[in-house]
Amino acid sequence: MFIYPQLLETSPEPFDHSDVIWEPKMDGFRGILTRFDGKTTLYTRKGNVVTDRFPEFWEIPASGDFILDGEVICYDPQNKQIDFELAMQRFSTKSHSKVLYKSKTLPCVFVAWDILFYKGKDLRQTPLIKRKVILENVLEENEHFLKIRYIEGQGKAYFNSIKKINLEGAIAKFKQSFYVSTNPPTAKRSNHWLKVINWKYTNVYLTGYRKNPEFGWLAAIEENGQIKPVCIIEYGATPKERQAFYGVAKSLITKEDNEMVYLKPAIRAKIKFRNWTRKGYLRTPVFEEFIL
């Protein structure tokens, strides 16, 4: 039995509200974990079964039949920080022998934050704060299973603490809200769950753009006297800003290929992004403004 997960809306800033709880935003991939008649199944948020890729989740420290909502995360063995790329590395590993090896050398953790079904009862019409109590009583913690911690009300102070320890962000959830599954194709997001991203900021040169209809600006930084590409910006620029860019860019063209037009590094911009990848690229870059 699979339930489509509730999706989040975005809040630009944290806020204080007595009817809200705040949780850390986990940087992995969404998972729906079920057990029925002794059989464990791990689904992605779109309903794909990936149980065989994560042997560490086959035995769940809980009793009864249930459906849990949460995040699959992976810690860097060296710095002990949550690492999105390592979680994706585990997700993409399918060979049985490699799966078994990595489950020991690069184990993942399922961080549960909600319980949607328990002992024959659909809990989605039960208020969130009561579902939290049920989850607390059902699931025990061990090296592979954690229950997410949360605080009540004080979102601004909480988000400041999130930034200090460099987590991905924070999530606000209304205590009395019901669980709203977002079935495709509508995939309507719920404003009862709100994410606030801990964005990082940097300045870049815009050194090219895509030729095809799909929008994209090539961005680079200066490093050791060289211009180094770091990302393609696909979001954030308004039609007016795009028009202004192309008006200036036509006089800066140096070369082109089948996909890209390349420019002299003369146009500068401020962008926000999630984090630096292991290969030195910016994850999820978003245009903020031109630097004039």
Image (spheres, rainbow, N blue to C red):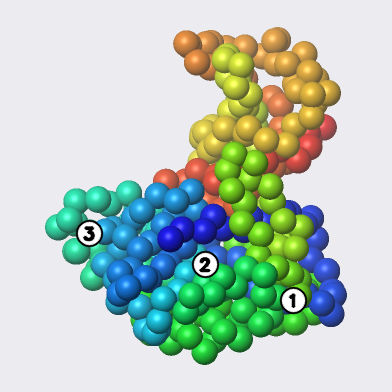
Q: Is residue 64 visible?
A: yes
What x and y, as percent, mark residue 12? 79, 55
Residue 99 image label = 3
Query: Residue 22 appears in which quarter of the rendering?
Result: bottom right
Image point (61%, 16%), residue name: 213
Q: In terms of secondary structure, where does tag 3 sit?
A: helix
Amino acid identity at mark 3: Val
Cα distance between the residues tagged 1 and 3: 38 Å
Residue toward you, 108 or 166: 108
Amino acid identity at mark 2: Asp
Amino acid identity at mark 1: Lys
In the image: residue 15, left or right of residue 80? right
What x and y, as percent, mark residue 2? 46, 58
Q: Is residue 167 visible?
A: no
Cα distance between the residues tagged 3 and 2: 23 Å
Image point (53%, 17%), residue name: 260
Please state, as top left, top right, bottom left or bottom right, where the N terminus lies in the image.
bottom left
Which is in the foreground here, disc 1 or disc 3? 1
Q: Earlier in the sequence, mark 1 or mark 2?
A: 2
Disc 2 target residue? 69
Disc 1 target residue? 175
What x and y, as percent, mark residue 62? 40, 83
Q: In terms of secondary structure, where does tag 1 sit?
A: loop
Count of labels shown? Answer: 3
Given the current orientation, which residue lies at the most extreme left position?
A: 97
